[in-house]
Image (cartoon, rainbow, N blue to C red):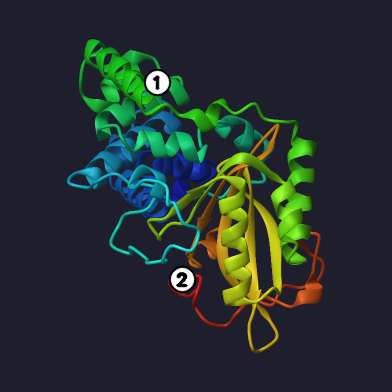
Amino acid sequence: MDRDDFDQQVAPYRRELLAHCYRMLGSVHDAEDLVQETMLRAWRAIDSYDADRASLRTWLYRIATNACLTALKGRGRRALPSGLVGAAADAQAPIELALDVPWLQPFPTGDDPAAALAERGSLRLALVAAMQYLPARQRAVLVLRDVLQWPAADVAEALETTPASVNSALQRARARLAEVDVKEDEVDEPRDHEIRQVIDDYVRAFEAADVDGIKRMLAERVVLEMPPAPLWLVGRDAYAEFIERVYAMRGPAWRMLTTGANDQPAVGAYVRADDGRYHAHTLQVFTVGKAGITHNITFFDQTLFEYFGLPLAVLGDEVVDGRLVGGSSRSDTSPARPSSLAR
């Protein structure tokens, strides 16, 4: 491969490599850095690339996987609140941020139908969270074998081990996932248009500060968790009580923009400030089952808005049914650091 053609040749693989690194790392920020590291390593090693031995895609995946394994050395797992502490018994519990915890992050869903089909199911937040319990090499084997469908021999070559070791690691990884019990991936999901209707109704109720309307969209045992606050709640009543608390602290004037994360419905939530504009507050990722919303992971990290292509501020009349109808009012400043609900 000619160095002059390098960028053009590798460009089609950037998106899937980003998803691959995210599965390994659980962080979209870190995944983006590792894709850049992968491209740098590939550029430096381009003279050693042999197209007769491996496709360019396979070669890049090998480099990316080993870059991720290097990055994961000495790191703890990324978590969600439900993986660290027990559920809060009180919806009025103090909200204290734990910014020193390496929290799991959401991943923006692409608009490319082919990419979405390839990623379907393998980026679910519950699955990515469960994979964080695996040692790094087991995680790599699981992704390469079960997600990318690589033969054991190819995985062994990429990881410089034997097919027997790969198969053993895969068995251990699958057993560990079974112990973690990824219940959320087993949710009996409604059809896409039914999910869209539930989220649209939730958005309208939230923007109207209609707590009873919000409750009607929730499953009885709905889970609400809020990284980087090590706090999560279970149950429709606790969820509704917390939302009432949000309105009491931040006011009832909100707007939401619909998006997608981890092949799940998501919204960017905006709260009205003194300047009359609605400013980025949280990114919320939903799981929807037959009984309604079963899980809402609310990320208090406005730096995520950029990754999801969402503005940092909007005017109220720009947003209709969760969508921008005019030009977005992007803030001229950098995204804010994670904030508390009470701020």
Identified at 42% across, 66% down, the residue is 95
User: Counting other residues with Cα less than 10 Å from the Cα at mark 1, is it few (<14), some (14-19), or many (20 or more)?
Assistant: some
Residue 315 occupies quadrant? bottom right
The reply to whether residue 325 is visible in this rendering is yes
Nearest-to-viewer mark from 2 and 1: 2
Identified at 24% across, 46% down, the residue is 76
Q: Are marks 2 and 1 in contact (CB under 8 Å)?
A: no
- Where in the figure is residue 333, as x and y percent of width and height? 52, 82
Give the mark count: 2
User: Counting other residues with Cα less than 10 Å from the Cα at mark 2, is it few (<14), some (14-19), or many (20 or more)?
Assistant: some
Reply above or below: 168 against 338.
Answer: above
- Where in the figure is residue 177, as x and y percent of width and height? 37, 25
Reply above or below: 245 against 53.
Answer: below
The secondary element bearing badge 2 is classed as loop
Q: Mark 1: which amino acid?
A: Arg
Residue under numbered circle 2: 340
Which one is nearer the viewer's eye here, 201 or 330? Answer: 201
Q: Can you say which quadrant of the picture contains the N terminus?
A: top left
Residue under numbered circle 1: 145
Which residue reaches farthest bottom? 275
- Residue 234's disc is none
Q: Mark 2: which amino acid?
A: Ser
